[in-house]
Amino acid sequence: MPTDNPTDKLDRVVAQARRDREEREKGYRERALKLYPWVCGRCAREFTRENLRELTVHHRDHNHDNNPPDGSNWELLCIYCHDNEHSRYIDSEAGDASQVDKRKRATATHNPFANLADMLKEKK
């Protein structure tokens, strides 16, 4: 009886994960395409059956398992806007992790308009 090569086993796991993802996407993608007009929610590019593959479903809360039947967690985005949205999300997550606690950050104490009223009175 042949033993499983670790590479073969990994390939099978990855392939199954891809099939599962594609199956899950089919369900909410088909529902989203029925609910919403075929227009990118960001750039307003319109889609037809010929280029519909370039229109994706974006999860507003970034949770691909949150698929309410009314589609309230989805928006249709072209592949470019979708990529941009995820890049912005990743950047904001990285920024939040690297910042010092916002309550501890120094606040500005100088008010450049503190004497504005007095200066305006002097001009009169």
Image (cartoon, helix red, strand yellow):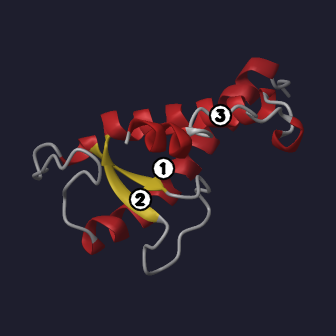
Q: Position of residue 33 (x, y in %)?
A: 28, 65
Residue 107 position by quadrant: top right
Q: Are marks 1 and 2 in contact (CB under 8 Å)?
A: yes
* Quarter of the image that includes the C terminus: top left
| Most foreground residue, 25 or 74 | 74
Q: Residue at x 32, y 33 (%)?
A: 80
Q: Position of residue 117 (x, y in %)?
A: 52, 46
* Quarter of the image that includes the N terminus: top right
- Neighbourhood count class around disc 1 (C-alpha, 10 Å): few under 14, some 14–19, many 20 upward: few
- Between label 3 and label 2, give the one nearer the viewer: 2
User: SS at mark 2?
Assistant: helix
Q: Which residue is mark 2?
A: 26
Q: Earlier in the sequence, mark 3 or mark 2?
A: 3
Residue 101 can be seen in this image: yes
Residue 22 got which mark?
1
| Most foreground residue, 49 or 6 | 49
Q: Is residue 62 left or right of residue 78?
A: right
Q: Earlier in the sequence, mark 3 or mark 1?
A: 3
User: SS at mark 3?
Assistant: helix
Residue kind at label 3, given as amino acid type: Val
Using the numbered discs, state the Cα–Cα distance from disc 3 to disc 1 in whole angstroms. 12 Å
Residue kind at label 2, given as amino acid type: Lys
Residue 14 got which mark?
3
User: SS at mark 1?
Assistant: helix
Q: Residue at x 12, y 50 (%)?
A: 46
